[in-house]
Each structure stands twice: as structure tokens, then as C-alpha cells.
Image (tube, helix red, strand yellow):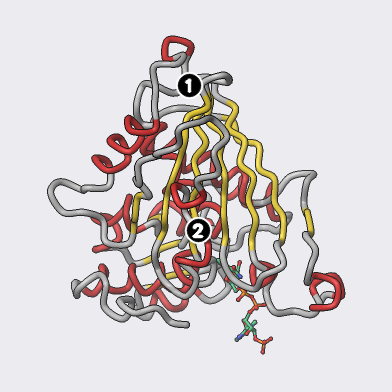
Amino acid sequence: MKYVPTFLERGARVIDLSSDFRFKKAADYEGVYGLRHTASQLLDQTVSGITEFFRKEIASAHLVANAGCYVIASVLGIIPLLKTDLVDPDALIHICAINGTTGAGSSLKKDLHHAYAFGSMLPYNLNGHRHRLEIEQRLNELSGKNPTVDLTTIHGNFARGIIIIATIPLSKSMIQKMGRQDLCAIYNHFYKNGKKKEHFIQINDAPSTAKESNAKEYDIYPSLARVVGSNFCHIGFDYEKERNVVKVVSVIDNLVKGAAGSAIQNMNVMLGIKEQEGLLTYGL
Ligand SMILES: NC(=O)c1ccc[n+]([C@@H]2O[C@H](COP(=O)([O-])OP(=O)(O)OC[C@H]3O[C@@H](n4cnc5c(N)ncnc54)[C@H](OP(=O)(O)O)[C@@H]3O)[C@@H](O)[C@H]2O)c1
């Protein structure tokens, strides 16, 4: 927010990776980040940088605010279901999110040293994570519903990648009527984007062939390793009929789809060039 007004005055178009322009109201930013907003006059014209949902607005935007990494993984994973009338309108959505240690940035912290973090897991900010309100606001804006989110954040013992698991309660009328195949149909249809499939979204729709409950079919859910180094988001799910909840798994690389990759994708849209330019191969 210190530099962006100058860049815009000089005619540059800006894609901001920080949190400064992610909220529509300065008061929300000040409440969550504890800092005074010094460029709040720009909030109205800022476009959210989740490309799959704001592509048209991004194309002509001068200021794009890329969403937080947990926000991108959560919103891409939850919105297709939340936009249906299957979800309990008073839903409390639990999101358990595990991020690599790069999610903490590169400044030195003892707890993140290899000797401490390797072979361990590090829960943090359980008193309220900064991305929680941003997730709620994007879900509300994109679905018209008002879900409450409970976000639990953990650093895993790996450098890159985010896996979120969202537990979404369905309305009572759905009890036991849902199945994994129905979810596959909802998500595949949603990300077709007219006739063209969203390039960076992959739905893990492998059918379950389990003959018994509790069979360990690991491959029907997304794997973190498959997206690390890429701009892809892989999404999978299942329905737990005893609890009438859908569990959505969404995985991204926090530094690519969660940050720089999304920024490149947005830049491509802003420049009117092929959206996948520079993002077609895995970077690692
Ligand atoms: N890490 C993630 O997963 C992630 C995901 C999405 C968005 N983001 C956002 O992306 C931004 C960067 O996060 P990060 O994790 O990459 O943090 P980081 O590892 O701390 O990197 C910040 C970088 O910015 C440079 N820098 C700081 N002040 C500068 C200045 N005044 N002029 C020029 N360079 C300056 C630093 O340079 P020095 O090293 O020389 O100090 C450093 O290279 C943050 O706003 C963060 O919220 C991060």
C-alpha cells in the first residue's frame, strides 16, 4: 500500500501478492492485520486475483489483489458445492489446512529449522488465522451464502504445498441421498466453464471400487506431491453419510498457484495472452 498508488499514477498495472488489498473495507484489514490502511481509496477498484472466478474483471483491472494461499485452495475447493442448494445454509465449515514451511516466509525462526521441523508438525495461530475472514468473505461473495468458517492451520514437515480438508455439512433433506459420484458430477460440471475445462483445476474423480467400508483407497483423493512445482489445484471429496457431511480435499503449491503462479496467470489474462503461458511445465 506504500508503493501501489505511485505505480498506478504512473500508468502501471499492479498484481499485489500481499494482503494489503484483499479486503473491500479498510476496517477489516485494520482489524485483521492491526495496521492502518494508507491507500484505502484504492480498495473499491481492486479486483480479487482468483483467476477462475474473476477472469473477466481481471482482464481490464489496474489493481489485482492476489488472494491468500489458504484462501485460494479453500475457495477453489468449496465453492462448487456451496453454490448448490445441498449445503446447510447455516453451515459451520471446518477447514483443516497444512502448509509447507515456506508458507512462513524466509525470515529465520528457530521452530522452522530443519532440526526442529523435520519429523514433526507445527500447529499455529489456533486463536484465529488471518485468512479466516478472507475465506468467509470470498465464499459469501461468490455463493451468496453466509457460511461460518473454522480454520485450523499447521505447518507440515515439507517445504512447499498446501493441503486443505474442508468438512461441509449438507442440509437435512440430503441425508444419505448423496454419493461420491454425485459430487464428481457437480465438480466436473462446475469447472467446465461453458464448454472449456478450467486448465489448472483437476477433479480427482476416480471411482471408488471399495467393497467394504474403511477400505484404504488412497488414490481417490488428491495427493500433495502431484501439484508441487505446478500451478495446478487438484480437488477431491467424499460423502460421510453417518454425519451427512462432504469432505473436500484441495491441494496446491503455496508458492505457485498460492502466489507467483496465480500472479503470472493473472498477468497473462491482463495482457490478453494465453492464460497458461509460462505455466505449462512443472517448475521443479
Ligand atoms: N509464502 C507463501 O506461501 C505466500 C503465499 C501467498 C502470498 N504470500 C505473500 O507474498 C509476500 C511475500 O511472502 P514470502 O513468503 O515470499 O516472504 P519472504 O520470504 O519474507 O520474502 C519477502 C521478500 O521481499 C523482499 N523485500 C522485503 N521488503 C522489501 C523492500 N522494501 N524492497 C524490496 N524487496 C523487499 C525480501 O528481501 P530480503 O530477503 O532481501 O529481505 C524478501 O526477498 C507476502 O506479502 C506474503 O503474504 C506468501
Relative to 99, 145 lies left or right: left
Residue 160, image x and y in percent?
59, 71
Residue 123, image x and y in percent?
78, 54
Is residue 46 visible from the viewing direction of this image?
A: no
Q: Amino acid at mark 1?
A: Leu
Q: Is residue 174 above or below residue 122?
A: above
The residue positioned 73% from the left and 54% from the top of the image is: 34
The disc placed on residue 170 is 1
Q: Is residue 24 above or below residue 244?
A: below
Camera-near label (2 vs 1) is: 2
The residue positioned 79% from the left and 44% from the top of the image is: 127
Residue indicated by mark 2:
223
- What is the distance, in whole Å, between disc 2 and disc 1 at their CAs? 25 Å
Residue 63, image x and y in percent?
39, 65
Q: Amino acid at mark 2?
A: Ser
Disc 1 C-beta below 8 A from ligand 1: no
Residue 101, image x and y in percent?
69, 70
Per the image, label 2 sits on a secondary structure element best described as loop
The disc placed on residue 222 is none
